[in-house]
Amino acid sequence: MTADHVAGHADNRDIYVRDVILALRRRWMLILATVMVVGAMGLAYAIFAKPLYTASAIIQPATSEEAGGAFSSLASQFGGATSLAGITLDGGDAEAQANMAILKSREFSMRFIAQNDLMPYLFHERWNPETQDWRSGEPGLLARMIGGLSHLIARLSEDEGWRPPSSIPSDWDAFNIFDKKVRHLREDTETGLITVSFVVRNPELAAKWTNAFVAQANAEIRARTVSESSRAISFLREEIQKTSVAGVQDTIYGLMQSQLERVMFANSRPDYAFKVIDKAVPPEDRSHPKRPLIVLLSLFFGLALGGCLALGVEAFRGAFSRV
């Protein structure tokens, strides 16, 4: 490629850039109008959108030393016997991971939703506060069209077909909203700390539900531990009656002692599974919407959209004039 060709390409690029700038200058009113309209829409959303508040609590899973320090030596001494009997002695990493899994589980979340009566909040658009019942109504036009088409396909395929959604929300829908939009869990792999957050429309409820969620998790895990250890103690009492060998009896007594210590440890600690490092408090500032950010992004988007519209109008008019 010669120097003349390179210079020609550079000139073409300069001409193209100059044409774009001139087109934008000619359509500056269109660009300004677009920026104002989009900016006004963003401002309206930022002002009238329902505010959301985020309350967070920082918790720490119980370590193996905290949960089983009093009887960890017994765990190492009678490890084989406990495995055969199906008895748990220590609260190591496996138990901490199991407790974290409970915190994330659908079953625990649904119990929390039921005990705190969160269904009317999660589905407030379907709840009638006057009658204290779910709203009932005819399905919309789109739902009827989809239902009719599905019914026709179902008759041809001998299937049950699609049914319009019920006004009463299901547990599956409740968990999806709760897990994705309301309750958030973030685990720091370096420190092991867990941040439990609730994002709701009321700051007091955000803090209340966050602390209640942690407290209920500790209460349920503590009750489960006491129940398991109590069953283990009953089993060991039956087994000690079946043998007269002193060594075996000593082993069983040691196992019973470990389970009793586990029960005492669980009953004496409210934060048995998760130690509360920082309790949730009602937030003073909203977490959504971020009004300055929304307005700024709206202005940038309006500027970009206005520029594209201006270039599109210029290109259309140029193509039309050549016809």
Image: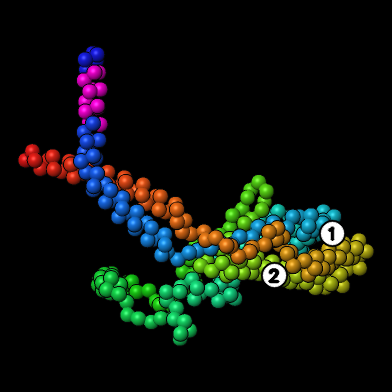
Image coords of residue 314 (percent x, y): 18, 41
Report whether 275 appears left or right of 164.
right
Q: Residues within 10 Å of mark 1 (few under 14, many from 20)?
A: some
Image coords of residue 278 (percent x, y): 68, 59
In which quadrant of the rendered image does the C terminus lie?
top left
Report whether 191 appears left or right of 320.
right
The residue tagged 1 is: 70
The residue tagged 2 is: 219
In which quadrant of the rendered image does the N terminus lie?
top left
Residue at the spot 40% in from the left edge and 50% down from the top edge: 296
Magenta stretch, residue numbers: 6-17
Image coords of residue 193 (percent x, y): 66, 53
Q: Nearer the viewer, mark 1 or mark 2?
A: 2
> As shown in the figure, which amino acid type bears the numbered disc 2?
Ala
Up the image or down, 36 lies above or below 270; here it is above
> As shown in the figure, which amino acid type bears the numbered disc 1?
Ala
